[in-house]
Amino acid sequence: MSVPIPAPTLSRDGARVRILDQTALPHHRVTLALDSLDAVAHAIRSMQVRGAPLIGATAACGVALALQTAADDATLEHALTELGATRPTAVNLHWALARMARVLRPLPPTERLAAAEREADAIITEDIATNAAIGQHGLALIAAIAQNRPGPVRVMTHCNAGWLATLGHGTALSPVYAAQAAGIDIEVWVSETRPRNQGLLTAWELRESGVAHRLIADNAAGLLMMRGEVDLVITGADRVAANGDTANKIGTYLKALAAADNGVPFYIAAPVSTIDFACPNGAAIPIEDRDGDEVRVLHGRDAIGATAQLRIAPADTATGNPAFDVTPAARITGIITEHGVMVPHALATLAP
Ligand SMILES: CSC[C@@H](O)[C@@H](O)C(=O)COP(=O)(O)O
């Protein structure tokens, strides 16, 4: 028995793609119906949908949507280019678009729409299965810890790599849900993940699923590891280079450093679609820079529940806002893929 997923993150419904608007969470549960290529590109860019696998699947649906009006070469190429320019780091976006291009380019226009819908559906279905396999491989790691010590297994995670970021149970959180379903006592340290606070999404989805968790400020992670209050760290990934260097949400690297310094195992959970075999190492991974207002302005809700913004730094404060960092392979204990837990330098064996 698996933990139920409380709401679909993405569904294809005829001429529309329905998404759960993640910019409204954790305060409001809003579903948006996207009916054009531009709406899909905006949803990815503005992070209404986010998380590497979900971005990829949404882009695939966006291609299918674009072909509803016309399926000539120019329309197809325009859709691939527009969607490909939305976010640079998560390789699943480019993986999904390359997969769509490979299937659609050789076809006559009359056959493209049906083929695009089939391929988008296949990407969605495969992600659900991939998440489940990652969950089972990660479960074995958690179960081994549970056998050797009393009390809950304490997992630390960063950003959101749960069901909100995928089509299934997530990547980093899939082992947590599998452990919950297996009756293992588990507790998750959820780091806030400034500046976009995806940790709030993680806290929300864990609460929806009844998983014990504690929200912490990002800066608390090192102390908790030093005190022996973390059994393992599991995060997701946006792009894993061929040598195992891994880009994930900004702040992941600091957690890996603290984990290494304190002997805490540090795992990345990611499907093979997140491995960029053409990218030799972390230095070659493009890192997204985002708007400075993400650092200067907090988003939340006011006393009567309305969405509210709070400016915490003047609008002319200079900022730096890299959205991802790179954890060197040497700091990663293992990469939990759908094919098993790999040491980073063995990834090449998974290359297509
Ligand atoms: C399964 S999602 C893995 C990663 O995509 C996740 O950890 C992450 O960094 C998401 O970044 P985001 O900027 O919110 O799209």
Image (cartoon, helix red, strand yellow):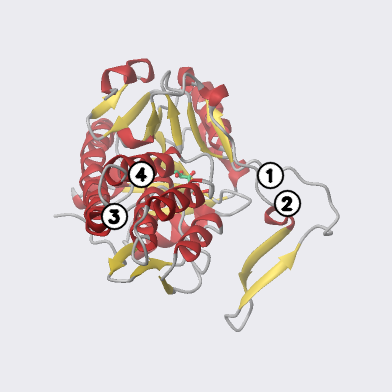
Q: Which mark is residue 321?
A: 1
Q: CA distance from mark 2 to mark 3?
A: 42 Å
The first of marks 1 and 2 along the sequence is: 2
Q: Amino acid at mark 1?
A: Asn
| 1 or 3: mark nearer the eye | 3
* Residue that carries the numbered disc 2 in the rendered image: 292
Q: Name the image quarter holding the N terminus.
A: bottom left
Number of numbered discs overlaid on the protein picture:
4
Mark 3, secondary structure of its residue: helix
Position of 215 with respect to 119 (left or right) is: right
Position of 116 with respect to 239 (left or right) is: left
Q: Amino acid at mark 4?
A: Ala
Out of 60 and 203, give the one closest to the viewer.
60
The first of marks 1 and 3 along the sequence is: 3
Q: Position of residue 71 (x, y in %)?
A: 34, 58
| 2 or 3: mark nearer the eye | 3
* Residue that carries the numbered disc 4 in the rendered image: 96
Q: Position of residue 159 (x, y in %)?
A: 49, 47
Looking at the picture, does residue 66 appear above or below residue 263? Answer: below
Q: Amino acid at mark 2?
A: Gly
